[in-house]
Amino acid sequence: MLIGEYKHSLDPKKRLSIPSKFRKELGEGAVITRGLDNCLFLFPSAYWQQLAERLGNMPLVQQDSRSFARLLLSGAMEVDFDSLGRILIPEYLKQYASLKKVAVVAGLYNRLEIWDEQRWEQYKSNLEKNSDSIAEKLTELGI
């Protein structure tokens, strides 16, 4: 299970160290892609295969299906960990997430999210302000 929050600096070559706890859960490889809210998603390869298949089977005639598949699939790239547990983040994904010096790697059960530190702090602050109303909405959904 991927849970927790860690901050790491991007090195001069734009590599990001993934915490060893997360690397163990991710296994041999992973797939990085555009995420929602201008962060990046990092999926275990096995989970990505299932997700990509579901996205690929969505109806082509539905615009939202096409758009969401484009967002995730066209931006995806397989990544490997180097001997120090780092991944290389492609420039187009670094720009998408506005990654600068420090990134936050957050575990969300079946994926990791990679955020620019400042954006994460702003997002988290807004989330904390609205946590009561969010909890209420989730209760209505039976969660």
Image: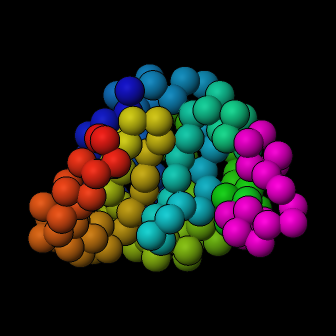
Q: Is residue 102 visible?
A: yes
The foreground one among 56 and 112 is 56
| Prevailing secondary structure class for the magenta stretch in the rendered image | helix
Q: Residue furthest right?
A: 60
Q: Is residue 141 above or below residue 24?
A: below
Magenta range: 53-68
Q: Position of residue 27 (x, y in %)?
A: 55, 24
Q: Position of residue 102 (x, y in %)?
A: 32, 64
Residue ID at (39%, 63%): 115
Query: For the N terminus, which image quadrant?
Result: top left
The foreground one among 13 and 101 is 101
Q: Would residue 85 appear left or right of 78 to someone viewing this image? A: left
Q: Position of residue 140 (x, y in %)?
A: 28, 51
Residue ID at (20%, 73%): 126
Query: For the C terminus, which image quadrant?
Result: top left
Q: Is residue 88 visible?
A: no
Q: Would residue 5 appear left or right of 74 to someone viewing this image? A: left
Q: Is residue 108 magenta?
A: no
Q: Is residue 19 above or below residue 121?
A: above
Question: Where on the picture, by quarter, is residue 101?
Answer: bottom left
Q: Is residue 55 magenta?
A: yes
Q: Position of residue 117 (x, y in %)?
A: 29, 67
